[in-house]
Image (cartoon, helix red, strand yellow):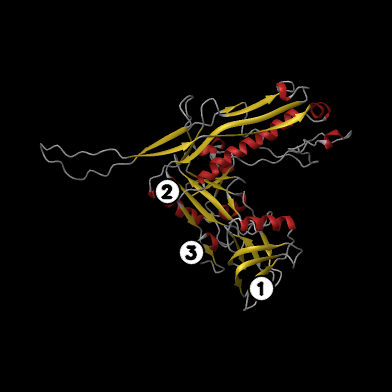
Amino acid sequence: MTYPETLGMDLQLFAESYADTQTSQLNQAGNDMSPEMKTFYNKHLIQTAEPELVYDRFAEQYPIPAHAGKTMEFRRFSPLKKALTPLTEGVVPDGNKLNVTSVTVDVHQFGDFIRYTDVIDTAAIDNIAVQTGEVLGSQAGRTSDTITRDIVCAGTCKMIAPAINDDGSTTETLTRAGITVKNRLTPAVMRKAVNYLERVNAKPFEGGYVAIIHPDTACDVTGDPEWIEAHKYASVEEIKAGEIGRLHNVRYVKSTEAKIIGPGEIVEGITRTALHTALDGTGSTTIKLDTTISAAQAAKTNEQITGGATLKVYVGGKEATVTQVTAGAPGTAALTVSAAVKDVAKGAMICGYGAGADGSAIYCTMLLAKRAYGTTSIQGLGLEHIFKQRGSGGTSDPLNQFSTQGWKMTKAAVRLVEEYMCRIEHSTACMGLMAESN
């Protein structure tokens, strides 16, 4: 397996955690760095803890040569059926033919930059050029990883972990809406997924298949008596970055970037709240919320609804379609829905659509085999770090006032063999009712 082309920037370079200290931010519009101007300032500038970036690591890399267009075609040859019919002496058989399946993907360009003034660059206590490069490096790495992750996690092969009942029995769950915090990732679920990959002859990576899991769900599998922690491997060199252990021919790699699907927004910035006033057997089309909705939030959502958008929510686990939002304080803020909702207790969960009906977030654990997916970029246009000192902007910087730093890259990801990866959808009792989409 080869690795992504990088030009002047290491995606993992800033994946470290530092002690908390005073926060300093670059304001995108005005680069407001006033905290930097303080005479006495803690020089230990805060560093944001970075996640393990793992999705690109397990992709097949296929760069597009320069001057060869922006579209990559991947070709897969289907296996031939067994030739079980005996040959007839002296008779030429009909023969066979190759069956080729092609998958194409278009490469796109991504990037961002920050501009800062000569005054900030000169007067600031901290080295703004260095700090800007680290912030942009982090952004570039997370962007690349997420582009790949979202393609991988949209595959057609999936299974939903069953709910674990109080008595230890399990109940099958068929839809995302039915997922609750009882639908947990367990060794039994993973064994079933591994069995699927083995049945389709998907080849494991060196040391086993790979599962990308979120830290919130790690405790659901690590308690198995057969679990082998990474630091107990026979050879330390075998450990992949982020790997926490092995179980049943699976190497588990942990990352906070493992995909989470949280409830959709009820209004901007609010995905979950509680029912302020109980709904009796008669029901009501007015759902009073135990939260504050501003006039701006209500106006924006009502404009979207008027424009044809459909807004669905769950009220105590019951699906409803919102026709209007009313701003106000708790008890006054309300949703008007198209049909009366009945028999829901005060304090019941109200949440956006798209995840569990009870507000549970859905975690997507990916079980991967070799050659399941690939990434591509145009050679010579991989990840590039671009730094321009003040005075290099020509007519756009006539007084030599601005410096800029930025990055750009070409990138595309594609699923090559759907059967070689399996998405296990589940929640977790740890943070399932709090986690948001990432």
Label 1 belongs to which residue? Answer: 345
Marker disc for residue 397:
none
- State which mark lies toward you, 3 or 2: 3
The amino acid marked with disc number 3 is Glu
In percent of the image, x 54 and y 29: which residue is there? 5
Marker disc for residue 197:
2
Say which element carries label 2.
helix
Query: Is 291 situated above or below 20?
Result: below
Residue 145: horizontal and vertical position, in percent? 58, 39
In percent of the image, x 51 and y 29: which residue is there? 378
Say which element carries label 1.
loop
Q: Is residue 400 left or right of residue 146?
A: right
Determine the CA span between mark 2 and mark 1: 44 Å
- Quadrant of the rendered image containing residue 219: bottom right
Can I make out residue 424 in this image? yes
Label 3 belongs to which residue? Answer: 172
Mark 1 Cα shell of 10 Å, populated few (<14), some (14-19), many (≥20): some
The amino acid marked with disc number 1 is Ala
